Structure formats: structure tokens, C-alpha cells
Image (cartoon, grey):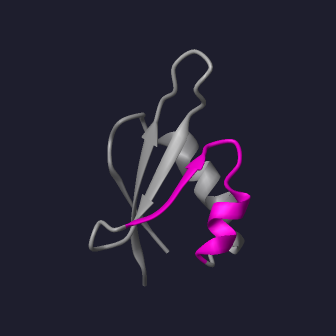
């Protein structure tokens, strides 16, 4: 079972919302726009988890690091 950490960052004005995806050692794996995760998730091999991740991201608050398990 893999453990990841997600941080949802709220954009201001013309800057969109972003997400940081980090591993167990807190190494940054991906940094992507909340509305365009496809390429970033495909790069790290998590494209199959996109729908589940987006649903989870919708339920977490901005600015709080949240654990996400696969």
C-alpha cells in the first residue's frame, strides 16, 4: 500500500488552483493544476487513480497537507 500526501493550493485572481503530490519521504512527485491533472499523473504512473484522486481533492481544505493511501 502506497502513502502519498496532497496539498491543495488556492489560486488568486488569474492564478488557478494547484496541487502538490508528495511521497512518504515528502519528495515532490507532481505539481499540477487542479483542473488538469492528466499529464502529471500519467508521468508518475497514477493515471488510473485520477477520478478517485479528484473526488478526494474535492473534499479536502486548501492549505492543509492531507494523507492519501492507495
Q: Which residue: 33% across, 68% down?
A: 27
Horizontal side of 37 relative to 29 (left or right) equals right
Residue furthest top in the image: 13
> Is residue 37 shown in magenta?
yes
Q: Which sits in the foreground, 41 or 64?
A: 41
Q: Which residue: 45% across, 36% down?
A: 9
- Against 64, residue 20 (above or below) is below
> Is residue 35 shown in magenta?
yes
Please state the horizontal and vertical placement of residue 69, each as a whole percent of the image: 43, 70
- Against 1, residue 48 (above or below) is above
Residue furthest front in the image: 14
Please state the horizontal and vertical placement of residue 70, each as a whole percent of the image: 50, 75
Please state the horizontal and vertical placement of residue 30, each as a whole percent of the image: 51, 61
Residue furthest left in the image: 25
| Quadrant of the rendered image containing residue 51 | bottom right
| Quadrant of the rendered image containing residue 4 | bottom left
| Quadrant of the rendered image containing residue 1 | bottom left
Q: Which residue: 63% across, 78% down?
A: 45
Horizontal side of 12 relative to 26 (left or right) equals right
Q: Which sits in the foreground, 65 or 25?
A: 25
Q: What are the residue bounds of the magenta stretch?
A: 28-44
Q: How many marks?
A: 0
Horizontal side of 12 relative to 4 (left or right) equals right
Q: Which residue: 58% across, 50% down?
A: 32
Amino acid at each position: 500500500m502506497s502513502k502519498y500526501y496532497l496539498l491543495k493550493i488556492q489560486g488568486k485572481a488569474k492564478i488557478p488552483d494547484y496541487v502538490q503530490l508528495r511521497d512518504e519521504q515528502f519528495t515532490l512527485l507532481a505539481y499540477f493544476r487542479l483542473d488538469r491533472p492528466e499529464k502529471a499523473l500519467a508521468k508518475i504512473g497514477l493515471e488510473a487513480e485520477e477520478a478517485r484522486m479528484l473526488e478526494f481533492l474535492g473534499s479536502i481544505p486548501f492549505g492543509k497537507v492531507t494523507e492519501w493511501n492507495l
